[in-house]
Image (spheres, rainbow, N blue to C red):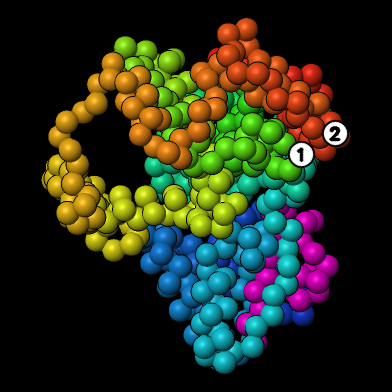
Amino acid sequence: MLTLMGLGPGDASLITREAWAALEAADAIVLRTRRHPAVAGLPARLRRRSFDRFYDSSDDFDAVYARIVEAVLKLARKGDVIYAVPGHPLVGEATVPLLLAGAREAGIPTRIIAGLSFIEPSLEALALGEAARGVPQVDPLEGLQMCDALDLASLHHPPLNPDKPALIAQIYSRAIASEVKLTLMNQYPPEHPVRVVNAVAARTRAPTLELALHALDRGEHFDHLSSLYVPAIPRLGGWGGSSFEELQETLARLRAPDGCPWDQKQTHASLRESLLEEACEVLDAIDADDPQALKEELGDLLFNVIFHTQLATEEETFRMTDVIAEVDAKLKRRHPHERPAPPPWTACPRPCPPWPSRRSCSNGPSGRVSSGRRRPSDCAKCARNSARSSPRASPSTRPKSWAICSSPWSITPSPTASMPSWPCAGPTASLGGAFAGSSSWPARGEWT
């Protein structure tokens, strides 16, 4: 029998009664590591064996885990073994899934004895810190995201929703903190407040340390029990979310049966001129070297992309996941030297070939790109010609100053709006979230 036991996140007082009963009935225990507060409080008569020497002799964690699994399975083939790990066996333990798979293949019966994971004490530590600051406590059911620091450090962009908080485990050194910081700063601003959490310290000293993200690695406040809490990015003006998902929800809400009549009426064809206009305004902002204008115009262009995708979703032709998967796969196909095997990628050993040639190779003759570029000054003419030449184009395309519907669903046009307001219907109570509690949304040109 192979018993996989969790020792909890702190000293021996946090070991469960089930685990303690098993320890008292055993003669020996195999520890993944002795570097854990609970080890000192284990029954003194237990013979102990650990794999710390594996960590000391290699910097390759995958190789270390493979050696540990091999050694534990070898012992389990000879008799009963208790393999004890920090926290809960099924939370953040790379060796446990490998052991379960190996034991199943070898016909070795297994038992799991749960332990308190790092999550609950971390939430306790955060609650103590938040209460002192008068901030509501963190409820994991309200969207708390969790990931491993080593996984995050290996990426260039964090796979996190910035509208939800995140808890990052196992930030055990300044080096890991530095890598995590760089990854997070591809999405979060440098001054974004974060908190280093030491769950074991929750009952003995200040459990959290707040600092700006850019300063995360500028101190010796990490050990093997440290985690990082990343709060959600505050909503812009109390309204705007920062995530792709939030923007999709906003558009889907406007397209809902009790949403905005203007948005409900639109089709792919009626949005053609808007798409062209916004693309040209992006070019104008680039040519003007105006970062603020570029930020706004890219948002307007993204709105068009999401709008078309929402229409396709309702028609059940494709979804946003299909759009993203298509372009992501295309980018990786066009950079074969970056992915010798999927994954991992490696750095480009040579400059990429010109994009048009790679596009031709991947898409065939129809994928060739014209060398001529439409100038921004031509965009108005192109938009007019496009509208005239397309029988599907709608003359009711929303002007630049269109206003967004509000709760209680009455359009508030901006002073320059040339389009009549639509009488929107729908009860205020059906909104919720950022939609509720306001008489109107600001007009498109008035967003700040």
Magenta-colored stretch includes residue 18:
yes
Quadrant in the picture for the C terminus? top right
Does 381 sit left or right of 12 as displayed? left
* Magenta region: 1-23
Decide: is 388 above or below 286: below
Question: What residue did someone put label 1 on?
Answer: 258
Decide: is 67 above or below 438: below
Identity of the residue drawn at 73% across and 72% down: 113
Residues at marks 2 and 1 touching, judged by CB atoms closer than 8 Å: yes
Q: Is residue 12 shown to the viewer in this render? A: no
How far from the left and from the top, in percent, is residue 108? 59, 89
> Looking at numbered disc 2 in the image, what kind of residue is underneath it?
Pro
Q: Is residue 111 shown to the viewer in this render? A: yes
How far from the left and from the top, in percent, is residue 15? 76, 61
Identity of the residue drawn at 69% across and 33% down: 260
Q: Which residue is nearer to you in this view: 303 or 241?
A: 303
Identity of the residue drawn at 24% across and 61% down: 340
Quadrant in the picture for the N terminus? bottom right
Give the CA distance from mark 2 to mark 1. Answer: 8 Å
Decide: is 138 above or below 283: below
**Quadrant housing residue 59:** bottom left
- Of label 2 and label 1, which has the lower sequence position? 1
Q: Which residue is nearer to you in this view: 185 or 418?
A: 418
Which mark is drawn over residue 427? 2
Tell me the SS state at disc 1: loop
